[in-house]
């Protein structure tokens, strides 16, 4: 049965990030990023790949924009590489670097595709990292300088801005677990990074408003519904703590509520970092909340032996993506119902949603990614339900436009609507590309 739930104003898009697709890691004066350094450190990336070339988008952007136009995208979300603009993180501007984004924006607009710019998708200039990175409060000032430079240059054409992508990942995966750049293993570093990222967001909002007429400004968080594995007090607390860590630590301050109390880290460390005026700055009014959704979390307490806990009644389903993530579409509606009830942000965009599967070209040179089509269909059904319930969701960005460098997994995980042969850089639209094109054209789920 075909449904027609999407209004004409709803934006269908796709998303990428600079380090994952651009390549040209040292091209035309670009500075080194923390991901350049991390990838060039033996043992950090699963398949020993780097983003040195990735999808070579820096040279093939016109071909990629043509593929976006053929797909029928209303909007394209991409990130700007900070060290490509300011090689040292501050100071001298690399004209060749910013000129690339000038051309890309113009190319998108010529095709009728609305650019959504993300200022920070994890590729901090290495020189700033050498000075303390996000653990240093001075990096907040550097980010504001960077936001000013980019918005002055592109703000006459780009109206939609995202300050940060998934600060949780930068802070906790990069600075506590160490699986991402810069590879630190410190609770103190993770919490300092958390506060300084959120402060950088808040302090950059008025800069973007000043430089961009009719700006629409938001931030993107990765959010999971957190379900207790049983009705036991221990599991309920574990679920609340995970919600505090992943969701509320990054939502509450932006909503003007400060940092949450139920969390699995030393909240006193975080509180000690807050200076007068910080929380007010972080709560600068935004125009939309960006949500990256992939899965849920089922929380089982590790605080008590299994035999002393209640029997587990909530289990992760068998269907999982190539990342090992449970496919749980209904969590998307649950998440937005909670956001609208508890936070009531002005409007929302789903800034990432997608799935990795082990795609291969068949004998006819096609990629029949049926599982991904099913994944998108079921999640878009939830999007329709969100809209039907009056929640102001205004757009959906599939992750990702193309297969790319998937961080610590290197080139081994494929999320794209477009298959990339990383040896030849040949682009092949997958079945999901053609399916999504039909959805966009008909503004309906097929």
Image: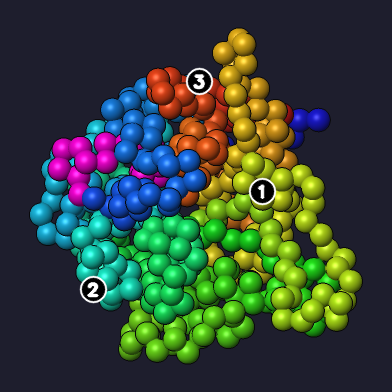
Up-down: is 219 above or below 252? above
Is residue 219 shown above or below 411? below
Total tally of numbered discs in the picture: 3
Question: Residue furthest toward the left?
Answer: 92
Asked if residue 79 shows in the view, the reply is no
Label 3, secondary structure: give it.
strand
Residue that carries the numbered disc 1 in the rendered image: 324
Q: Earlier in the sequence, mark 2 or mark 3?
A: 2
The circle on residue 138 is 2
Name the residue located 27 percent from the left edge and 71 percent from the top edge.
132
Q: Earlier in the sequence, mark 1 or mark 3?
A: 1
- Marks 1, 2: nearer the viewer: 1
Distance of label 2 from label 3 (alpha carbons): 44 Å
Q: Residue at x 62, y 33 (%)?
A: 358
State which quarter of the image contains the N terminus.
Answer: top right
What residue would you read off at disc 3? 428
Give percent across and percent down for residue 103. 24, 33
| Mark with earlier residue (1, 2) | 2
Q: Is residue 22 magenta?
A: yes
Numbered disc 2: secondary structure: helix
Seen from the viewer's position, the closer of residues 281 and 361 is: 361
Q: Residues within 10 Å of mark 1 (few under 14, many from 20)?
A: few
Mark 1 and mark 3: span between their CA atoms? 25 Å
Can you name the residue that lies furthest to the top here? 364
Q: Position of residue 238 (x, y in %)?
A: 70, 76
The part of the chain drawn in magenta is 17-31
């Amino acid at each position: 049965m075909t449904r027609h739930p999407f209004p004409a104003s709803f934006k269908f898009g796709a998303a990428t990030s600079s380090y994952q697709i651009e390549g040209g890691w040292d091209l035309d004066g670009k500075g080194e990023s923390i991901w350049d350094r991390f990838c060039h450190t033996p043992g950090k990336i699963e398949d020993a790949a780097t983003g040195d070339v990735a999808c070579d988008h820096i040279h093939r952007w016109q071909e990629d924009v043509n593929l976006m136009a053929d797909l029928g995208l209303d909007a394209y979300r991409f990130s700007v590489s900070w060290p490509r603009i300011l090689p040292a993180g501050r100071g001298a501007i690399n004209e060749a670097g910013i000129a690339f984004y000038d051309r890309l924006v113009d190319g998108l607009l010529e095709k009728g595709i609305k650019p959504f710019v993300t200022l920070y998708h994890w590729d901090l200039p290495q020189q700033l990292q050498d000075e303390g990175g996000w653990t240093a409060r001075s990096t907040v000032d550097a980010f504001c300088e960077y936001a000013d430079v980019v918005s002055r240059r592109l703000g006459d054409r780009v109206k939609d801005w995202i300050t940060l992508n998934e600060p949780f990942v930068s802070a906790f995966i990069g600075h506590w677990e160490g699986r991402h750049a810069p590879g630190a293993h410190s609770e103190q570093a993770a919490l300092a990074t958390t506060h300084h990222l959120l402060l950088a967001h808040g302090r950059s909002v008025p800069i973007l408003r000043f430089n961009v007429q009719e700006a629409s400004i938001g931030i993107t968080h990765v959010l999971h519904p957190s379900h207790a594995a049983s009705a036991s007090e221990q599991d309920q607390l574990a679920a609340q703590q995970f919600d505090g860590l992943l969701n509320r630590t990054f939502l509450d301050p932006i909503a003007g509520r400060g940092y949450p109390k139920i969390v699995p880290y030393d909240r006193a460390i975080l509180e000690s970092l807050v200076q007068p005026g910080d929380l007010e700055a972080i709560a600068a009014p935004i125009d939309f909340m960006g949500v990256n959704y992939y899965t849920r979390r089922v929380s089982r307490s590790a605080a008590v032996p299994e035999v002393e806990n209640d029997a587990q009644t909530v289990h992760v389903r068998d269907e999982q993506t190539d990342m090992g993530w449970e496919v749980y579409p209904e969590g998307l509606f649950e998440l937005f119902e909670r956001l609208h009830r508890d936070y009531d942000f002005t409007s929302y965009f789903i800034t990432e949603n997608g799935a990795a599967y082990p795609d291969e070209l068949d004998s006819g040179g096609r990629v029949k990614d049926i599982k991904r089509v099913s994944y998108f269909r079921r999640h878009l059904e939830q999007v329709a339900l969100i809209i039907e319930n009056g929640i102001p969701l205004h757009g959906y960005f599939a992750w990702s436009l193309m297969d790319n460098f998937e961080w610590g997994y290197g080139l081994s995980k494929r999320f794209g609507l477009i298959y990339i042969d990383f040896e030849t850089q040949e682009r092949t639209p997958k079945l999901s590309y053609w399916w999504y094109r039909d959805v966009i054209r008909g503004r309906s789920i097929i």
